[in-house]
Image (cartoon, rainbow, N blue to C red):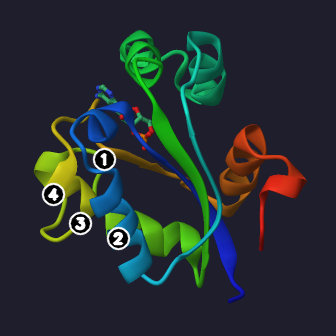
């Protein structure tokens, strides 16, 4: 399969609530190819670095604490129009506004603990994928 990539994390809330399998199923059914994947835990420092763009936002501290609070599944997905199609599949950041059938509508509990991350641009997808995976860990 060709196509562009996006980067995702199954966040600590979804891992804790036992939703890894169901979310990976949705990703497969959505037509994405998983080209890299790892089960890992972010240190506070790494979570802060990953979300540095939100440093000035009032929720930054909470976000860093939450994202380092337990294991995550990090993955790179390939597919047509990957960034936009994956954002459609996961739904709005706030699960209260996420469309029915989306991953966040099904598995997120709040705007902060929203089950999954999805890159917001092709450029950020590349940066985020490289943050978590080396070239030899991605199988395009
Ligand atoms: P994500 O797509 O991973 O990118 C940034 C994250 O910040 C977002 O998902 C949310 O988990 C979190 N976030 C965004 N807005 C808020 C908010 N108002 N309060 C708490 N967390 C937020």
Tag 4 near tag 2, CB within 8 Å: no
Q: Kindly identify which residue carries mark 2.
A: 25
Tag 2 near tag 1, CB within 8 Å: no
* Label 1 near ligand 1 (CB < 8 Å): yes
Q: Which mark is residue 93?
A: 1
Q: Which mark is residue 106?
A: 4
Residue at disc 3, secondary structure: loop
Residue at disc 2, secondary structure: helix
Q: Which of marks 4 and 2 is in front?
A: 2
Q: Residues within 10 Å of mark 4 (few under 14, many from 20)?
A: some
Q: Nearer the viewer, mark 1 or mark 3?
A: 3
Q: Kindly identify which residue carries mark 3.
A: 102
Q: Nearer the viewer, mark 3 or mark 2?
A: 2
Residue at disc 1, secondary structure: loop
Please indicate whether residue 13 sits to the left or right of residue 38 in the image: left
Tag 1 near tag 3, CB within 8 Å: no
For the point 44% across and 25% down, the residue is: 67
């Amino acid at each position: 399969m060709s196509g562009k990539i996006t980067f995702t994390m199954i966040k600590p809330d979804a891992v804790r609530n036992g939703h890894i399998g169901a979310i990976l199923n949705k990703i497969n059914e959505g037509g994405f190819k998983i080209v890299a994947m790892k089960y890992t835990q972010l240190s506070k420092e790494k979570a802060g670095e990953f979300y540095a763009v939100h440093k000035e936002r009032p929720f930054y501290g909470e976000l860093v604490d939450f994202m380092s609070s337990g294991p995550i599944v990090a993955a790179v997905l390939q597919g047509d129009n990957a960034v936009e199609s994956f954002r459609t599949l996961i739904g709005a950041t706030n699960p209260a506004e996420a469309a029915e059938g989306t991953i966040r509508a099904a598995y997120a509990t709040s705007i902060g603990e929203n089950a999954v991350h999805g890159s917001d641009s092709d450029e950020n997808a590349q940066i985020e994928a490289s943050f978590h995976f080396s070239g030899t860990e991605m199988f395009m």
